[in-house]
Amino acid sequence: MRIDIITVLPEMLEPFTTQSILGRAQKKGLAEIHVHNLRDYTTDKHRRVDDYPFGGFAGMVMQCQPIDDCIAALKAERDYDEIIYTSPDGEQFSQPMANELSLKKNIIILCGHYKGIDHRIREHLITREVSIGDYVLTGGELAAAVMADAIVRVLPGAIGDEQSALSDCFQDNMLSAPVYTRPADYKGWLVPDVLLSGHEAKIKEWELNQMIERTRKLRPDLLNE
Ligand code: 6GU
């Protein structure tokens, strides 16, 4: 799949797209992440991409022209399944949404900034508005990085063990069981016996019980959905 991210701060996204899961997935040819500097698309001679809001409100608003031209340039090259705008008033991002978006071929993520973007862009070009939680970030870049990471890591082959993205926390609306590694006895802190037993069925049963118990205790809201 391909993710195009439009931003006024491309250098902020660079480390996320070249390192870790996203970097490796790109090297393996599973995903392509392209970051576009919105300022490259403005017709303003001072490279401005924002202006004062009509109505005398506080803050600055990202203008239609650079965003429209940038999206048009991308759309001229390929079809997009979604054009996402990052905004605290959007639909809340979740594991099911990450799974769903990972099945798309091409998506655009437009990072919001300042007081937001001219509403006409949202009405005419944006297909989906997404928030990563109920708090306000300075810009949409961190939200775009969070979304790209969560989307790409569920692509088959993106993480070493193909099973492990499927057994992630939240994939079944449940928290994961605790994990342990050697040594089995660290300063008298012991690993549960069942994990050392080699009894596969009992281990599976223990894991499921742990998942249910932890979810009930820490996130009871997940069980009621
Ligand atoms: Cl997507 N953008 C901004 N600016 N703040 C946020 C957010 C997005 N999601 C949560 N807070």
Image (cartoon, rainbow, N blue to C red):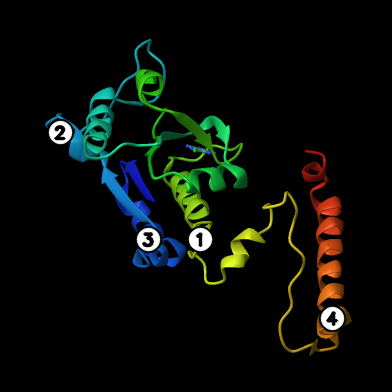
In which quarter of the view is residue 177 placed?
A: bottom right
* Residue denoted by label 2: 46
In whole angstroms, how far apart are the C-alphas of marks 1 and 4?
Answer: 29 Å
Q: What kind of element bears circle 4?
A: loop
Quadrant, the C terminus: top right
Q: How many marks are shown on the rendered structure?
A: 4
In whole angstroms, how far apart are the C-alphas of marks 2 and 1?
Answer: 44 Å
Amino acid type of disc 2?
A: His
For the residues carrying marks 3 and 1, which lies nearer the camera in this image? 1
Amino acid type of disc 3?
A: Pro
* Residue denoted by label 4: 199
Task: Please indicate whether residue 84 sits to the left or right of residue 165 in the image.
Answer: left
Does the residue at mark 1 contact the one at mark 4 (Cβ under 8 Å)?
Answer: no
Amino acid type of disc 4?
A: His
* Residue denoted by label 3: 15
First reached walking from the N terminus: tag 2 or tag 3: 3
In whole angstroms, how far apart are the C-alphas of marks 2 and 3?
Answer: 27 Å
First reached walking from the N terminus: tag 3 or tag 4: 3
